[in-house]
Image (cartoon, rainbow, N blue to C red):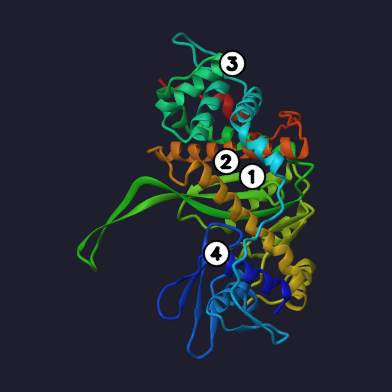
């Protein structure tokens, strides 16, 4: 047992609420995100925890030790006894920069969103009829609505204020914003804006984490269950697949799918999309993404994949990279896991997004639900840029990289038609 693990266990026992659930089960909050882990202390002395550290290494993790500390009967390696102490742990933080970023965030986000939407080209008007709204203004209104976390009607005040300050040309009606969000052709444009909003941090981010999480909706899936003889229903949710930087927590690429879509097939597009603008050195992900193709993919963009190997995975049959990392995982696991555990930053990103913008989707239609989640990601990136402005002195600039890639969303802009 390392001293570092014991120290963290003492911090958890002193600062977190460890709840007993059942005779031998305990719920221990995570130190890195809002979730919690289940610890089981069996009568036969067996100790289990649902955290990746215990599952991967099969040793006493900090959560098991924290439960033992709570029960007041743990001994460290040197034989000394550890008892629960009332200690409040604090971590280093540039509070001056943080306070300035938070107190100026709304203004800065509005200014950054104005600059971001300034690079959007509206389709040329064809035929007669009412002029279409500037596409950049519609995107501005959509993201601002999500950022304010209120309904379209209540967000109208902020959108009109943006028009009065010269950030947009026209203030779209809340019904117009809702209709545009229902357009499938808006999705690739919003996806392109996710990457564009992250690009100013390209010099700071080289290590990335991949993960997915669900966003619930107000719609339900219904079916008749013959076993129970009644109609059943389950809340429908969308799954957001993200890749994010581990230093600033900015999202570099996002894919929104139905909840039934598996994680591993999304890995390729996430990594390749990030590599278009970022110098990828490391990519960390959990076991769901383990495959030789994904290893080769990361190596192909110049990075090293840190994905834990499953118990049945062998070191033979793969290429040199697979064999090298498998041996590192088996015989130098401590070092391997230091890189792998950067993956927890992806969970932090989801926690930040859901805490600030909600884990619930207001929109009712599938396309608008997808677009709403992408707007959440864009709003999150603008908040991280604001933090970087005050903490690192960053001067964000958008649309400095010219691309001819059709996936950038440029082609879809010409096809976007104003809803009638």
Mark 2 or mark 1: whose residue is earlier in sequence: 1
- Residue at the location (44% across, 32% down)? 182
Mark 4 or mark 2: whose residue is earlier in sequence: 4
Mark 1 or mark 3: whose residue is earlier in sequence: 3
**Element type at mark 3:** loop
**Element type at mark 2:** helix
The residue beneath circle 1 is: 251
Spatial CA span between label 4 and label 1: 29 Å
The residue beneath circle 2 is: 377
26 to the left or right of 292: left
Mark 4 or mark 1: whose residue is earlier in sequence: 4
In the image, residue 100 lies at what x, y percent?
A: 67, 35
Mark 2 or mark 3: whose residue is earlier in sequence: 3
Figure quadrant of residue 251: top right
**Outermost residue, left direction?**
229
User: Which quarter of the figure is the N terminus placed in?
Assistant: bottom right
In the image, residue 412 lies at what x, y percent?
A: 57, 29
Is the Cβ of the residue at disc 2 closer than 8 Å to that at disc 3? Answer: no
Spatial CA span between label 2 and label 3: 25 Å
Q: 323 above or below 262? A: below
Spatial CA span between label 2 and label 1: 7 Å
Checking the image for residue 16, the label placed there is 4
In the image, residue 74 lies at what x, y percent?
A: 61, 83
């Amino acid at each position: 047992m390392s001293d570092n693990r014991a120290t963290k266990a003492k911090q958890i026992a002193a600062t977190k609420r460890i709840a007993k659930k059942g005779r031998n089960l305990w719920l221990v909050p995570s130190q890195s995100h809002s979730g919690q882990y289940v610890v089981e202390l069996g009568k036969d002395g067996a100790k289990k925890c649902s955290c990746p550290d215990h599952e991967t290494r099969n040793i006493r993790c900090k959560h098991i030790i924290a439960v033992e500390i709570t029960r007041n009967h743990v001994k460290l390696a040197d034989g000394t006894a550890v008892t629960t102490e009332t200690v409040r742990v604090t971590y280093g933080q540039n509070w001056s920069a943080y306070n300035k970023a938070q107190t100026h965030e709304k203004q800065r986000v509005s200014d950054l969103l104005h600059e971001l939407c300034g690079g959007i080209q509206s389709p040329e008007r064809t035929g007669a009829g009412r002029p279409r709204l500037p596409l950049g203004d519609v995107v501005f209104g959509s993201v601002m609505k999500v950022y304010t976390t209120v309904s379209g009607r209540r967000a109208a005040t902020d959108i009109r204020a943006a028009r009065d300050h010269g950030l947009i040309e026209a203030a779209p009606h809340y019904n117009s914003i809702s209709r545009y969000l229902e357009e499938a052709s808006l999705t690739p444009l919003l996806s392109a804006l996710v990457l564009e909003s992250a690009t100013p941090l390209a010099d700071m981010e080289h290590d990335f984490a991949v993960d997915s999480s669900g966003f619930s909706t107000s719609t339900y899936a219904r079916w008749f269950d013959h076993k129970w003889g009644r109609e059943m229903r389950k809340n429908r949710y969308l799954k957001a697949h993200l890749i994010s930087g581990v230093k600033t927590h900015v999202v570099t690429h996002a894919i929104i799918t139905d909840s039934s879509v598996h994680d591993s097939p999304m890995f390729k597009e996430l990594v390749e999309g990030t590599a278009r603008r970022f110098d990828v050195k490391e990519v960390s992900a959990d076991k769901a993404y383990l495959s030789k193709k994904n290893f080769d993919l990361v190596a192909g963009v110049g990075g090293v994949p840190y994905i834990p190997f499953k118990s049945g995975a062998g070191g033979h049959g793969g290429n040199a990279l697979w064999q090298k990392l498998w041996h590192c995982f088996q015989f130098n696991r401590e070092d391997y896991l230091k890189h792998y555990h950067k993956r927890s930053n992806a969970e932090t990103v989801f926690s930040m997004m859901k805490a600030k913008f909600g884990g619930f989707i207001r929109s009712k239609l599938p396309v608008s639900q997808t677009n709403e989640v992408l707007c959440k990601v864009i709003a999150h990136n603008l908040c991280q840029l604001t933090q970087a402005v005050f903490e690192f002195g960053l001067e964000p600039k958008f649309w400095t990289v010219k691309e001819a890639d059709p996936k950038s969303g440029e082609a879809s802009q010409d096809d976007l038609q104003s809803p009638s």
